[in-house]
Amino acid sequence: MADLADEIGSVRLRLTQALESEGRCWGTDDPGQAFDAAYAPASAYVQTLLADAEASVDEFARKLDVLTTVFVTAELDAEQIVV
């Protein structure tokens, strides 16, 4: 899960860099402004969703690690009691 969070972050970074390198290549004429009005908010939203997904998967990975540690510790403790 931590690797998945890292991969999401890597994809988000590559996407952001690629979009920034292109700039506003559609121009500032009327069609360009119309495109920008629809595209810019959607693009920002997708980037926000990717950042949220990265953070959520990372948090899940950390919590899963804690849960695994708790289960392993409980199992080891139970073995001590049974033996």
Image (cartoon, rainbow, N blue to C red):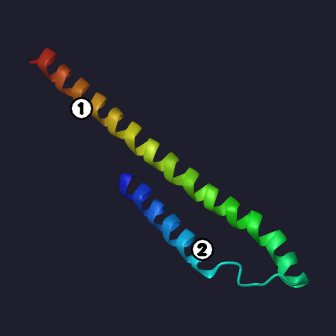
Depth check: give the residue in front, 35 or 72.
35
Q: Quadrant of the C terminus?
A: top left
Q: Which circle's residue, 2 or 1, is located before the other in the chain?
A: 2
- Who's the residue at 44% across and 47% down the image? 58
Depth check: give the residue in front, 81 or 72.
72
Q: Residue type at mark 2?
A: Glu
Location of residue 44 with respect to 67 vertically, above or below? below
Neighbour class for label 1 at 10 Å: few (<14), some, many (≥20)? few
Q: Is residue 7 left or right of residue 44?
A: left
- Who's the residue at 53% across and 72% down the image? 17
Mark 1 lies on residue: 72
Depth check: give the residue in front, 34 or 80.
34
- Who's the residue at 84% across and 70% down the image? 37
Neighbour class for label 2 at 10 Å: few (<14), some, many (≥20)? few
Q: Is residue 69 left or right of residue 29?
A: left
Query: Of all residues shown, which one is farthest toward the front?
Result: 28
Quadrant for residue 64, please give it: top left
Element at badge 1? helix
Which label belongs to residue 52? none
Query: Of all residues shown, which one is farthest toward the left?
Result: 83
Q: Residue type at mark 1?
A: Val
Kindly report the distance in space between the C-alpha atoms of the residues bearing marks 2 and 1. Answer: 46 Å
Q: Is residue 82 left or right of residue 53?
A: left
Location of residue 75 with respect to 33 vertically, above or below? above
Depth check: give the residue in front, 62 or 42.
42
Residue 47 rendering spot, x and y as whole percentages = 62, 61
- Who's the residue at 34% across and 34% down the image? 66
Mark 2 lies on residue: 20
Residue 20 rendering spot, x and y as whole percentages = 60, 74
